[in-house]
Amino acid sequence: MTVALYTDGGTVGRNPSPIGGTWAWCLVVNDKLVDEYCGLVEPTDMGMETISNNLMELYAALRGIEALPEGFNGRVYTDSLITLYRITYSESFNGVPEWLKERVKEARSCRKWFYDCVLLGGHPSKKELAEGRRKDGKMVSKWNVRVDKACSALAKNWLAG
């Protein structure tokens, strides 16, 4: 059985954004969608004046990991190298609020879940998606495209009012 969590985050408008950020995750088992969730965050929700893309990528991964069922044993996919490092072993949390840093560290040490992390190439063309790889060799996934589109749709709707 193949079990995977795909995560993505973004900003509303420019990066960093004084408006807010978006996050999304989806849980996939044997290439079938099992669960998904997405949301919006304002800078004040994070205790900050602006929200960066890197912060929302990390927040998306954390929200997805925290939503995993106990006993999860699979892979977490992200298209952010910084997020991959932060949810695995890095101690570098520049620009991350202390409360979020602590939650990430708690999730890393929690024994409810067992996962490894894989870096994907983001924003693939249709051809790259069909081939499963970008020109630079990074793997791509329709599920990563799904969470990216969820983030983009949230941001677009927010801006449209």
Image: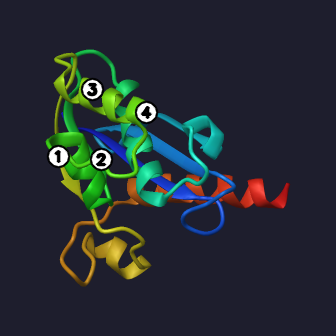
Q: Earlier in the sequence, mark 4 or mark 2?
A: 4
Determine the residue positioned at 38% across, 34% down.
Answer: 98
At label 4, counting other C-alpha atoms closer than 10 Å, the crowd grade (few under 14, some 14-19, many 20 or more) is many
Q: In which image quadrant can residue 47 be found? A: top right
Residue 33's spot in the image, x, y percent? 43, 39
State which quarter of the image contains the C terminus.
bottom right
Q: Give the Cα separation between the discs numbered 2 and 3.
A: 15 Å
Q: Is residue 80 above or below residue 2?
A: below
The reply, left or right, for residue 81 in relation to residue 156 is left
Determine which residue is flagged by label 2: 93
Of circles 2 and 3, which is in front? 2
CB atoms of marks 3 and 4 within 8 Å: no
Q: Position of residue 35 (x, y in %)?
A: 46, 32
In this rendering, the label closer to the viewer, 4 or 2: 2
142 left or right of 18 in image? left
- Identify the residue position indicated by label 1 in the image: 90
Task: Give the mark nearer the N terminus: 3 vs 4.
Answer: 4
- Which picture quadrant has residue 119? bottom left
Dot 3: within a 10 Å radius of its alpha carbon, few (fewer than 14), some, or many (20 or more) residues? some
Disc 1 from disc 2: Cα separation: 8 Å
Q: CA distance from mark 3 to mark 1?
A: 13 Å
Residue wearing tag 4: 63
Tell me what residue is drawn at x 35 percent, y 71 percent: 129
Which residue is at a point 34% across and 73% down the rendered structure image?
130
1 vs 4, front mark:
1
Q: Which mark is residue 107?
A: 3
Q: Secondary structure at mark 2?
A: loop
Q: Nearer the viewer, residue 81 or 76?
A: 81
Q: Which mark is residue 151?
A: none
